[in-house]
Amino acid sequence: MAVSGKTGRGTNPLLGSLKHFFAEIGELSSFTGRFFREFLKPPFETKELLRQCYQLGNRSLVLVMVTGFIIGLVMDLQSRPTMINFGAVSWMPNMVGISIVREIGPVITALICAGRIASGIGAELGSMRVTEQIDAMEVSGTNPFKYLVVTRIIASTLVLPVLVIFGDFVALYGSALVENLKGNVSFQLYFNTIFDALSYGDLLPATL
């Protein structure tokens, strides 16, 4: 029984869960603190940062645009009959535009990037650890945390708002296509109506 107590067996499951939770919080806090220390301390890996911005954006751009186009298309197709029944079809651009820009676009883009970018970064760093490339960087005097981790976090932070804007625009284009084909609404009129309904207060929080 003494051995089981030392190994953690037979203890209160709730207590074990709390210990694990606070241990994770501590590790996350330590990681965050180290990130800001390395981020503010020269030298700055600008070249690697730009390379990561290109790779991360290029890795997700097509998927974000295709998904956004389909979402805008389907959302307009599904909402249009209900709006017609209520005699509010003229409000379609406002409803779709605000819904996509404020909520749907950022959420879908974030989910895609979380799966696409995070899995790619995890696989890349894991492969570098297995092949001892990270050890080689330490031996050569390069800070692997700053070169590999900090640059990727900053690149993801910079790229995600750009992807959100692209995804929103393509989704609105998909909705505009439906309105053009079914309601004979010109693209210019559709986007003018959306831009009149939106403000920077809608776009800025969504991209952040």
Image (cartoon, rainbow, N blue to C red):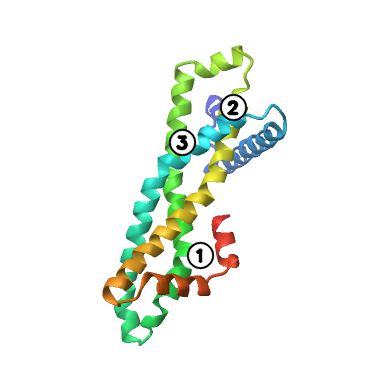
Q: Residues within 10 Å of mark 1 (few under 14, many from 20)?
A: some
- Sequence-first disc among 2 and 1: 1
Query: Seen from this angle, which residue lies furthest left?
Result: 182
Total marks placed: 3
| Residue located at (53% from left, 42% from top) | 156
List x then y, in percent, for residue 30: 66, 35
Query: Mark 1 belongs to which amino acid?
Result: Arg
List x then y, in percent, for residue 37: 71, 33
| Disc 3: which residue | 55
Q: Residues within 10 Å of mark 2 (few under 14, many from 20)?
A: some
Query: Mark 2 belongs to which amino acid?
Result: Tyr
Q: In front here: 135 or 57?
A: 57
**Residue 179 seen by the camera:** yes
At mark 1, the secondary structure is helix
At mark 2, the secondary structure is helix
* Contact, mark 2 vs mark 1 (Cβ under 8 Å): no
**Residue 10 seen by the camera:** no
| Residue located at (41% from left, 46% from top) | 61
| Disc 1: which residue | 102
List x then y, in percent, for residue 14: 55, 45
| Disc 2: which residue | 147
User: Residues under labels 2 and 3: Cα distance?
Assistant: 15 Å
Query: Mark 3 belongs to which amino acid?
Result: Gln
In the image, is 76 to the left or to the right of 1? Answer: left
In the image, is 100 to the left or to the right of 46? Answer: left
In the rendered view of the protein, which quadrant contains the C terminus?
bottom right
The quadrant holding residue 6 is top right
Q: Residues within 10 Å of mark 3 (few under 14, many from 20)?
A: some
User: Residues under labels 3 and 1: Cα distance?
Assistant: 27 Å
| Residue located at (34% from left, 74% from top) | 79
